[in-house]
Image (spheres, grey):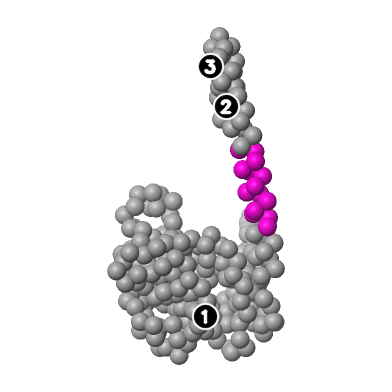
Amino acid sequence: MKKLLALTLFTPFIVGAFVFLFISKCFSQFDSSESVFHVNKLSPDGILLDKGWRFYSGDNPEWAKNNFNDSSWTDININQPISKLAPINKNNINWFRLRFTIDTTLRDTLLALLITQYGASEVYVDGRLFQRFGKISSSKEHISFNPHNEPLSFQLNPQPVHVMAIRFACDIPASNLILKEVNTYPFSVRLQSLQSAISEMKTNLIRSRAITSVTIVYAVFAVIFLFLFLFYPRQRLNLFLVYLVYL
């Protein structure tokens, strides 16, 4: 009886775990033996390219090429806070490389690359410069720019394995207390279908405008009540309404 009860209680958790693993396998799979990130399907939210990256501190334009051998580089998971990624905490130039494949069913799909970063970067796809964000300077006076996941469209060629190389410079020290508290990542890279990315951007824009409009309305009412209180200090209700608006 006890075994039957235990099985009944744990069955939903076991089924849930299998479903999660199945979905993870369907959408993406990182092959650690080959250091290749496989993109099998794209969900509406896209896929975060966080595993399979290789890192090296230094600067050489040859590192952007597809045929460059990066086997001696350090394997790194970029989905970590700046404070834990000691190699890129300085103002020097760093390179990241990722080998990935796209399922044949997605080769005719227009894709979008979405990047968030705290620094400056140059993004290369299959050996070609795809986009610059900010400016990287050899004098360490970098100009940072954060694209905030603005979708950038591109279409991959039919070759089986692709290479993304990122030349990156982070000018934010890991000792920054605020960054430690919020666990800020130096950069994140997400792959998404262009259609889904544009739809998501429009939704976020509408939401942002709505929040801004409501904030402005509240601020106007707060100023009105504040002036009413200043002109009629006996009416303390106006001061209470100012507090209520900002609450």
- Residue in view at x 36 percent, y 58 percent: 172
Q: Is residue 210 visible?
A: yes
Q: Earlier in the sequence, mark 2 or mark 1?
A: 1
**Callout 2: helix, strand or loop?**
helix
Q: Quadrant of the N terminus?
A: bottom right
**Callout 3: helix, strand or loop?**
helix
Q: Hey, what amino acid is under mark 1? A: Val
Give the residue number, with chain letter if any, for mark 3.
Answer: 230
In the displayed structure, 127 sits above or below 6; it is below
In the displayed structure, 213 sits above or below 75; it is above
Dot 3: few (<14), some (14–19), or many (≥20) neighbours within 10 Å?
some
* Mark 2 touches mark 1? (CB < 8 Å): no
* Mark 3 touches mark 2? (CB < 8 Å): no
In the displayed structure, 229 sits above or below 85; it is above
- Residue in view at x 39 percent, y 49 percent: 178
The rendered magenta stretch, by its main secondary structure, is classed as: helix
Give the residue number, with chain letter if any, for mark 2.
Answer: 223
| Residue 25 in picture, x, y percent from top left | 61, 74
211 magenta-colored: yes
Q: Hey, what amino acid is under mark 2? A: Val
- Residue in view at x 53 percent, y 60 percent: 148
In the displayed structure, 59 sits above or below 80; it is below
- Residue in view at x 40 percent, y 88 percent: 69
